[in-house]
Image (cartoon, grey):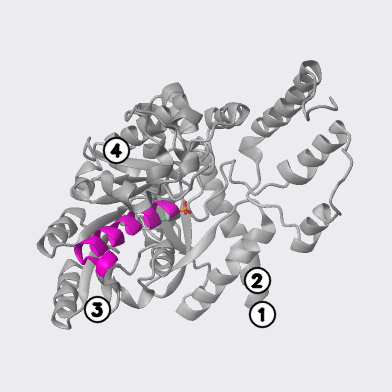
Amino acid sequence: MSTETLDLNNSDFRVLLEQSNRLVLEQFDQVQQQPGYHNFTQREVASWFNEPLPAAPMDQETLLGFVRDKILNTASGNFGPHMYAYVMAGGTQVSVVAEQLAATINQNLGKWHLGPAMNEIEQRVVKWGAEMLDYPDAAGGIMVSGGSAANLAGLTVARNVFFDRLNIRKKGLFGQKPFIVYTSKEVHGCVDKSLEVLGIGTDNLRKIDTLADFTIDLKKLEAQIIKDQEDGLLPFCLIGNAGTVNTGAIDDLEGLAELAAKYNLWYHVDGAYGGLAAALPHLKPLYKGMKKADSVAIDFHKWLYQTYEAGCVLIRDWPTLKSAYYKEADYLDTQSEDDQRLDLNKYSFQLSRNAKAFKVWLSLKAYGFDAICSMIQKDIDLAKYLADMVTAAPDFELSAGSDLAITCFRYTGQRTDPDKIEALNKRLIPALEEDGRVFITGTKLNGEFVIRACFINHRKSKKTTDYLLEVIREVGQKLEETTDHE
Ligand SMILES: Cc1ncc(COP(=O)(O)O)c(C=O)c1O
């Protein structure tokens, strides 16, 4: 290593890259066998890293060996086909390469001239995102960390536009009635968090009941809006779900658009999980109305299979995003007359920003969107395949299917008593974590605990789906044997 910089000379750096590439290839060699989980205790994992600040360098081989043994080979199985928890997409090889290339030139996308090509790529990817959804061409948007940040950004603009309508900058908040936001009970928790951050408060979030298919009940919604108006409150925002996190339910987005227009509400759609599936021709009709939204959250680290992080918010009236965040500062003034250079910090809370869109751009160029759509379709088909298998099996029961790729079910084994089935399924989740072959979590549907399998990984197949049921059955049977004696 040079003493003047931290750089290695080129030949030593080549060795480091080759060693690191070998590690990457080793991971891909065993991707299909990657277990869902390695059941180390928290104490053990913490002990691997429990050391004082290292003042001196570690030998490179030893360091990479440690990375392989303690970090890569112990990783949770998100990368392989046995991950079903939450909404965990496994990444693409091209996004792995893109991360390295983007890190090499280390562009900061806060200002256009700090990364001209990467800035233009971000704007192009945002346009492509809009195109996937049939969202208006004139809309704009920005890359953010993920779905939560995309929802927060959309709701921030919604709040600020409403503040302008009420002339809050002049009058202040004093004397205003609470502003009310509407969505369904199935909404993702990041909306609650956003409303806390925005000072609106979760008491002012109306979570409307859903119909049997977990989509929002429009009649109850309208009745609540009318009641709030009669009570002198200020309804201001309606949030539709384009794929709920629990079951992938897609609200009646057209019906919501009509209500938003009727009551003059900002219309935001959370498409973080399911928004991109609107690109599939046979699903398009389910998303009718999404293009009327004022803002939409989408997430490329979900159904575009990107590595973390890669969220995106789309705003119909793009200048409103700028008015939410724009701040002048002497040290940021480029003195440039070129108003075609878009400084993205003006549209974002962040000043320094990495080139999140590059991996999306490279993946779309390298694979083509059609290939990605066929992987989304495969996920949907596999979720249906699992639902069919669960329905046909005597020892499982289907709790909810989906138009998208989430299947909720329960292992019943020999049990018929609902309380015992509930207890068994709750115990199954930690037992499966301990087993480690697959990684799956649960949720509650109408208050009932269910196992929830989310298919959002292009490395899954019918074979891996069969394996999921086999493993759950085996672990479930063992659990029954032990708990039935209790
Ligand atoms: C519907 C929905 N909205 C928002 C989010 C939050 O996205 P992120 O985890 O990228 O912040 C998720 C995550 O699963 C989601 O499913």
Q: For mark 2, give the secondary structure.
A: helix
The local crowd at label 1, few if under 14, some if 14 to 19, many if 20 or more residues have their Cα within 10 Å, is few
Q: Position of residue 106 (x, y in %)?
A: 59, 31
The residues tagged by marks 2 and 4 sit, at their Cα atoms, a distance apart of: 52 Å
The residue singled out by tag 3 in the image is 177
Magenta stretch: residue 166 in it? yes
Q: Which residues are magenta?
A: 149-170
For the residue pair 299 and 346, the one nearer the viewer reads as 346
Q: Is residue 107 above or below residue 37?
A: above
Q: Nearer the viewer, mark 1 or mark 4?
A: 4
Amino acid under label 2?
A: Glu
> Along the polypeptide, which appears first: circle 4 or circle 3?
4
The residues tagged by marks 1 and 3 sit, at their Cα atoms, a distance apart of: 58 Å
Amino acid under label 4?
A: Ala
Q: Judge whether residue 291 can be spotted in this image.
A: yes
Q: Is residue 277 above or below residue 225?
A: above
Helix, strand or loop: magenta stretch = helix
Q: Quadrant of ligand 1?
A: bottom left
The residue singled out by tag 4 in the image is 130
The residue singled out by tag 2 in the image is 481
The residue singled out by tag 1 in the image is 485
Amino acid under label 1?
A: His
The local crowd at label 3, few if under 14, some if 14 to 19, many if 20 or more residues have their Cα within 10 Å, is few
> Along the polypeptide, which appears first: circle 3 or circle 2?
3
Q: Residue at x 77, y 22 (%)?
A: 13
